[in-house]
């Protein structure tokens, strides 16, 4: 008799890096994605975007979890937390949305509840430039380690 485990399915994870790589530390999200991509983790996909857009919903529903990595100007060196779904927040335009709206719309349109996590990494320099500041790179490297550990422990 062959027994099949219901837990054998590998979870598909999407990591989205948000930000402008031409604005120094605003490129933290892209940096994190590139570092995660270099780890060649199975069933982990990477997307790098300037901002979250409503068209992304069609991609998000193909994943079991979504991590959004983005730079912040305040707060801890890096934070990782679950996003609450609240579709009542206002949009800044018809094509741009925030993380909780992305999840809420995916649930409403496709009937799929996708856990979304936000990884905010503090930067220092948001002036024109293509390199991360020393502190932002250190914060981002710590975030990469934490995300990698989180994925491995799922």
Image (cartoon, rainbow, N blue to C red):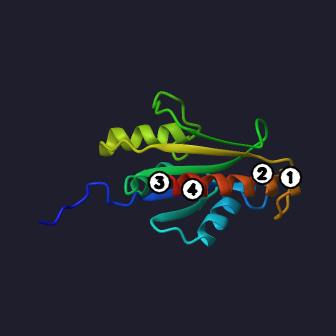
Q: Earlier in the sequence, mark 2 or mark 3?
A: 3
Task: Assign the N terminus to one quadrant of the image.
Answer: bottom left
Q: CA distance from mark 3 to mark 4?
A: 10 Å
Please identify the quarter of the rendering in which residue 31 is found: bottom right
Q: CA distance from mark 3 to mark 1?
A: 31 Å
Depth check: give the residue in front, 50 or 100.
100
Residue at 67% over, 57% down:
145
Residue 135: mark:
1
Q: CA distance from mark 4 to mark 2?
A: 17 Å
Q: Secondary structure at mark 4?
A: strand
- In the image, taking residue 118 as reference, residue 54 lies left or right, namely left
Q: Is residue 8 above or below residue 82?
A: below
Instruction: Give the residue number, with chain letter if any, for mark 2.
Output: 139
Residue at 59% over, 37% down:
92
Residue 150: mark:
none
Residue 20 spot, x, y in % from top left? 72, 57
Q: CA distance from mark 1 to mark 4?
A: 22 Å
Q: Earlier in the sequence, mark 3 or mark 4?
A: 4
Q: Is residue 91 above or below residue 119?
A: above
Residue 33 spot, x, y in % from top left? 63, 62
Q: Earlier in the sequence, mark 3 or mark 1?
A: 3
Residue 16: mark:
4
Q: CA distance from mark 2 to mark 3?
A: 27 Å
- In the image, taking residue 22 as reference, residue 89 lies left or right, namely left
């Amino acid at each position: 008799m062959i027994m099949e485990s219901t837990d054998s399915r590998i979870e598909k994870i999407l990591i989205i890096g948000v930000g402008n790589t031409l604005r120094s530390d605003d490129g933290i999200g892209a940096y994190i994605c590139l570092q995660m991509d270099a780890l060649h983790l199975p069933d982990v996909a990477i997307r790098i975007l300037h901002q979250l857009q409503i068209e992304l919903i069609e991609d998000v529903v193909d994943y079991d979890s979504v991590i959004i990595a983005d730079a912040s100007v305040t707060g801890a060196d890096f934070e990782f937390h679950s996003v609450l779904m609240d579709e009542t927040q206002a949009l800044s335009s018809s094509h741009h949305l925030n993380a909780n709206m992305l999840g809420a719309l995916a649930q409403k349109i496709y009937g799929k509840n996708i856990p979304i996590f936000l990884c905010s990494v503090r930067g220092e320099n948001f002036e024109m430039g293509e390199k991360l500041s020393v502190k932002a790179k250190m914060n981002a490297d710590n975030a990469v380690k934490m995300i990698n550990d989180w994925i491995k422990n799922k």
